[in-house]
Image (cartoon, helix red, strand yellow):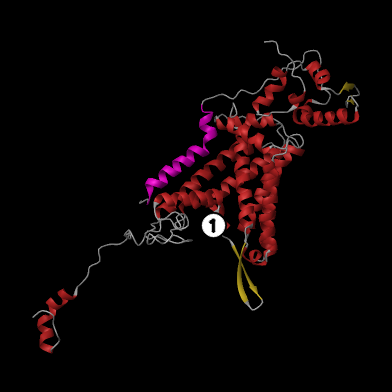
Amino acid sequence: MKIYDGRKIIPGILIAAVIFSFPFWLNFGKAAVPPKPKLPKEVKNCVEPTTFMRTSHMQLLNEWRDIVVRENFRLFAAPDGKEHLMSLQNGCLKCHESKADFCDQCHNYLDVKPYCWDCHLAPKENK
Amino acid sequence: MSAQKSILYPLVAVLVLILIPVIGVKLGLSYFFAVVVPYAAFVIFFGGILCKIVNWARSPVPFRITTTCGQGKSFDWVKHNKFDNPFTNKQVFVRMVLEVLCFRSLFRNLKMELRDGPKLTYGSAKWLWLGALAFHWSFLIILLRHMRFFAQPVPGFVDMLQSVDGFFELGVPQLFLTDAVIVAALTYLFLRRVVVPQLRYISLPSDYFPLFLLFGLILSGIGMRYFFKVDIIKVKELAMSLVILKPTVPEGIGALFYVHLFMLCVLFAYFPFSKLTHMAGVFLSPTRNLANNSRYKRHVNPWDYPVKVHTYEEYEEEFREKMKEVGLPVEKE
């Protein structure tokens, strides 16, 4: 079998193969460590069911922000009948005390950079 | 095939392809769709592209068949258009880079019209170029952004792409500009085939199928990001387990993810056997990647073999006496 221009084509194929298999060799032999967000001990239920919070908390927080900032209304009626304060620092962070142990766990894992902390003060972490 | 059928058949095919993972996951075949299908698609993609390239590389291209789109190299006082009519390999390289990254051949697209007179007129038609450029670059950026699911820690360039792409910080999760651009570009690329009569006439199912497949892929992805959420922590767990070759399938990712993944796998597996191989083929197109130097360099046909010839001298040598007898003139006595 004769390959014409092999001196150009074969390196080309190799370069393409390296680029396309990038995720394979980048992680080769590494074990993927899933994130472990630290859950609060005393409280078991969040404002919405866990599955909803996992996928849609950002949209909920976004709605909260709009309601609080634009309508100055701070009470959230949860589906389970309880009322919660719509507030990041005085609501969410009451239970989820640590940004590093809770928020950042998944956000760093998936390279999500929410702009919450552009305005809000991040909780002081005990180091 | 009529235009209606050319559109309808691939549309039905893609709809069926969307239903397959939905039903499959309901039947508990998530391992098959999350592990077996992606690996198979990956192997088919690589094997298929490799076969294609080897097949192309085995075909000799003995002569220079460059498309010359500008003044070729001539006398020193004739201005040479280096990148539209390359003469050296370096110029070819620049031409290829411009072709691959900027689609210059589409930039040269013309529209031909008969005006009253009748006069044949040509006008520039840049929309295809713009649509193709918008689509391909968005697709590349989206593909690179997905590397956040395949690496831990996430490489810096992904971070940079995400912040540039989400520059306007519209909504939560931030709207990525490429998501909007690719839908617009793909819609244009589809509509031009439907609206322009000449294009509708030459469009085949194999033109529409990749378009619908890409629509399915992109819309399912956009749907997952902005509207019908899936658990992306689990998605990354699956992706990471696939790339370290120890596949585990987390429970309850959500059916839409499987649709997205299956669309991608079909696209990958379909790639080498369709017009989409232009991804590899563009590098091997002889009308682009050859230097136009036929007048300066001798290019020998590789399948030339030594032809047995019988020259006139030999002929005369053989028949001289007989020629003399009948009075034919001979060169040597």
Residue at the farthest front position: B77
For the point 41% across and 42% down, the residue is A11
Front residue of this view, candidates A40 and B153: B153
Q: Residues within 10 Å of mark 1 (few under 14, many from 20)?
A: some
- A13 drawn magenta: yes
**Which residue is located at x 77 percent, y 22 percent?**
A120
Please give left or right for residue B9 compared with residue A27 in the image.
right
Quadrant occupied by the N terminus of chain B? bottom right
Q: Is residue B17 visible?
A: no
Q: Residue at x 53, y 52 (%)?
A: B278
Q: Residue A109 falls in which quadrant of the image?
A: top right
Label 1 resides on the chain identified as: B
Give the answer, above or below, for where B41 lies relative to B157: below
Q: Quadrant of residue B104?
A: bottom right
Q: Is residue B34 magenta?
A: no
Q: What main secondary structure does the magenta stretch of the protein show?
A: helix
| Residue A25 in view, yes or no | yes
Image spot of residue B61 (x, y percent): 39, 58
> Which of these two is toward me, A5 or B181?
B181
Type of amino acid under label 1 = Ser
Residue B51 left/right relative to A70: left
| Relative to A112, B274 lies left or right | left
Q: Position of residue B52 (x, y in %)?
A: 47, 51
Residue corresponding to mark 1: B105
Write down the quadrant of residue A86 in the picture.
Answer: top right
Direction left: furthest residue: B333
Q: Nearer the viewer, residue B292 or A38?
A: B292
| Magenta segment boundaries in residue numbering | A4-28
Q: Nearer the viewer, residue B140 or A117?
A: A117
